């Protein structure tokens, strides 16, 4: 009788062990399926993010090329403006010296030519001061 009770207890323990193992395996399968679904969703999200990053990189490269082209276009324009300003300055100085010479030749009398020369010289001084201020604001002292 002890043997039959022992066999019955061992069989019951084996059945309980198999039941626990089956439940554990079912639970593990459920957890692994959820992990697989999450991983697939993560992979899909990473692929979308990768496509967006590639699109952003292409847009950024295109923008950099466009900005570089515009900066390259601005350089000659700035040089032309600088040359124009210098030409205006030389013309004003020449005008002032010619009118001043004419006023001296006229006997030093103050007339419209002398007034125009004075105005031109004041304009030239004003232009130089504005340019010096602009350069100091830009930090190019």
Image: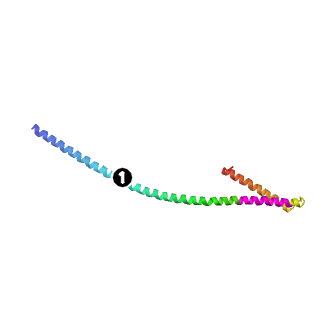
Quarter holding residue 17: top left
Q: Tell whether position 45 is magenta.
A: no
**Residue placed under numbered mark 1 in the picture:** 39
Write the start and end of the magenta stretch as one range: 84-102
Quarter holding residue 14: top left
Report the side of 41 relative to 27 (left or right): right
**x%, y% of residue 48?**
42, 57
The residue at the point 21 percent across, 46 percent down is 19
**x%, y% of residue 136?**
69, 50
The residue at the point 26 percent across, 46 percent down is 24
Q: Residue furthest bottom?
A: 112
Report the side of 133 relative to 69 (left or right): right
Q: Tell whether position 88 is magenta.
A: yes
Secondary structure mostly seen in magenta is helix
Quadrant placement of the N terminus: top left
Quarter holding residue 131: bottom right
Judging depth in this view, the residue of 29 and 135 nearest the camera is: 135
- Colour scheme in the image? rainbow
Q: Residue furthest left?
A: 1
Judging depth in this view, the residue of 67 and 79 nearest the camera is: 79
């Amino acid at each position: 009788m002890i043997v039959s009770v022992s066999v019955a207890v061992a069989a019951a323990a084996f059945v309980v062990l198999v039941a626990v193992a089956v439940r554990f395996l079912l639970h593990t399968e459920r957890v692994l399926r959820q992990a697989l679904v999450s991983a697939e969703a993560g992979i899909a999200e990473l692929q979308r993010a990768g496509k967006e990053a590639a699109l952003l990189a292409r847009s950024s490269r295109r923008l950099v090329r466009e900005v570089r082209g515009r900066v390259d276009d601005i350089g000659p324009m700035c040089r032309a403006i600088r040359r124009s300003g210098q030409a205006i300055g030389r013309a004003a100085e020449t005008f002032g010296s010619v009118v001043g010479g004419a006023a001296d030749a006229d006997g030093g009398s103050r007339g419209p030519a002398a007034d125009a020369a004075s105005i031109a010289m004041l304009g030239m001084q004003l232009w130089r001061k504005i340019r010096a201020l602009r350069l100091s604001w830009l930090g190019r002292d």
